[in-house]
Image: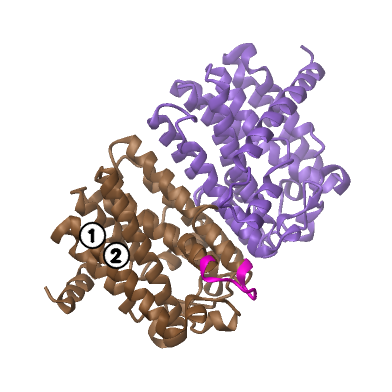
Chain colours: A purple, B brown
């Protein structure tokens, strides 16, 4: 399969899975009598019809490597996506990144209000853990607890939230490549890594297999972030669906501001090459995961 | 034992348990190399040296009814307390209740800043679930998942967060006693109920026992809130350690504004009487739980 074919097949598979995730999310977030309308509205607004669903797709494809059922990967991937959605709501708040635009639409706190956005984020976070508790996620409670623990660590103070905090305190200060790398490894990398790890947990992968998959995830997580920084400089709002040149305006150091455009591009490509080679042990089963590595640096939004 | 003796014994037992909880929290929140300093600082600020630790105490006493080990009750009660602490941080934010004072000190967003407070709340929430995942919480993963599920439901969009949303949209609007009761049943009641339910889960209580305990918890939860509304009107900042007359200033309907002081006091006392009678089936083992029912309406802070 040529690289172009692989990317096309990936795009189709991702769109198909995004549809499945969308339906499941819509189901999970369907109105119940006892729901507070405005809260549920904000939760739906911030999580439906949104994004590429990269994280659930990583969970699906990782699970497939170990022949774990799709129905388990769907629930776990969706739980991870909910954590991602909650983090975007809170990150966009005026006190945080103060961003009015997300996925081509007004951010949650603009469409509703700040209080509702804070609460919707809080509720989406906890909903993720509720989904994982259900025996439909996996019949073995030990596996469910392992997934909950993994998601908690990846998204908590020593993971995603810790990364966002480093990002905030780094504004308008001189930070070096090491700090930026650590920040991004936590802020976006931890959840991307867990998306892959979750598939390995569901499929009861060996430690060696899990290790390889995690290293792959770290590579593409970092490449993804460098690509994001490049889009912030080179992209347009119309194409990315979010504000651009945010980092420069906020005085934030990024991979691009530290390395320059050309070197940042090289770094991203080197990381994806490395990520792809890591997956050789899985053979053709890893075709989509390999293509994702290309995709994350070639995407335009 | 006279009522005064029971209250004294309760106060001592609560203070003792609060110390145990404090030490455990301090341990859980001890600095690790990879911690972001400011984030951990805010998490510690908002959860250490604070409050009566009513929820962990309810878990302890409920667990004791069914001879469940204290060490399990400590971890579960502390997880519940972390959820309580995170909710206070977010509730105090300018976009929410905009409260500068909490437990006699500046609120978290005043002592740090809004962004840090939002993130500290997010991190404390997820830490609660992480604690529950550990086998030290209970050796049986099925029990751990049941606890996680229960805490997720009690604190989520159909529980605590849903109640806070109802509270916010009810400001400056005519609400009736039914709405206030529903709001409080979710906002504060859900977590208080789960504090008792958790003890029953740890102790593998029968459905009947669990049911009785939950009804008791609902009664004291509501009584607690009525007492809170009374303190808001009758208390002083110096004694309660938080701003008073907030509700009146915010144009919020409360049990007191709807019922009047005297009728609200009667209602609270009637609920506690009912709560105490419910526990008769547990005999002397429930002495502290019975005393708590008195305590929640007689406390001055």
| B70 and B278: which is toward the camera | B278
Q: Is residue B75 visible?
A: no
In the rendered image, the vertical position of residue B90 relative to residue B103, given as above or below: above
Q: Look at mark 2 in the image and give the residue it sits on.
A: B275
Q: Residues within 10 Å of mark 2 (few under 14, many from 20)?
A: many
Q: Which residues are magenta?
A: B169-178
Judge if badges 2 and 1 mark residues of a common chain. yes
Q: Look at mark 1 in the image and give the residue it sits on.
A: B279
Chain for disc number 2:
B
Residue A107 rendering spot, x and y as whole percentages: 74, 55
Quadrant in the picture for residue A74: top right
Q: Tell whether label 1 touches label 2 (CB within 8 Å).
A: yes
Residue shown at the point (67%, 53%) measured from the top left = A42
In the rendered image, the vertical position of residue B208 relative to residue B269, given as above or below: above
Describe the element under mark 2 as helix, strand or loop: helix
Residue shown at the point (73%, 39%) measured from the top left = A51
């Amino acid at each position: 399969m040529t690289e172009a074919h692989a990317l096309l097949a990936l795009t189709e598979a991702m769109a198909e899975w995004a549809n499945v995730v969308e339906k499941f999310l819509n189901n999970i977030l369907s109105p119940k009598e006892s729901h507070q309308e405005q809260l549920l509205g904000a939760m739906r607004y911030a999580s439906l019809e949104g994004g590429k669903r990269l994280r659930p797709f990583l969970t699906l494809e990782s699970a497939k490597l170990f022949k774990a059922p799709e129905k388990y990967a769907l629930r776990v991937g969706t739980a991870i996506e909910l954590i991602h959605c909650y983090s975007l709501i809170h990150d966009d708040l005026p006190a945080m990144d103060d961003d009015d635009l997300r996925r081509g639409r007004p951010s949650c706190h603009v469409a509703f209000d700040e209080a509702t956005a804070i609460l919707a984020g809080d509720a989406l976070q906890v909903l993720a853990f509720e989904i994982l508790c259900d025996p439909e996620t996996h019949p073995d409670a030990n596996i469910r607890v392992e997934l909950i623990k993994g998601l908690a660590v990846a998204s908590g103070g020593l993971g995603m939230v810790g990364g966002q905090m480093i990002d905030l305190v780094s504004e308008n200060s001189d930070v070096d490549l090491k700090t930026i790398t650590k920040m991004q490894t936590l802020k976006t990398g931890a959840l991307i890594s867990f998306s892959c790890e979750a598939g390995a947990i569901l499929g009861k992968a060996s430690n060696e297999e899990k290790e390889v998959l995690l290293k792959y995830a770290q590579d593409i997580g970092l490449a993804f972030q460098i690509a994001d920084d490049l889009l912030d400089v080179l992209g347009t709002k119309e194409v990315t669906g979010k504000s651009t040149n945010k980092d420069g305006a906020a005085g934030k150091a990024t991979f691009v501001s530290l390395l320059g455009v050309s070197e940042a591009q090289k770094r991203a490509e080197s990381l994806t090459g490395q990520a792809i080679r890591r997956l050789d042990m899985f053979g053709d089963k890893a075709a989509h995961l390999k293509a994702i590595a290309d995709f994350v640096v070639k995407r335009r939004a």
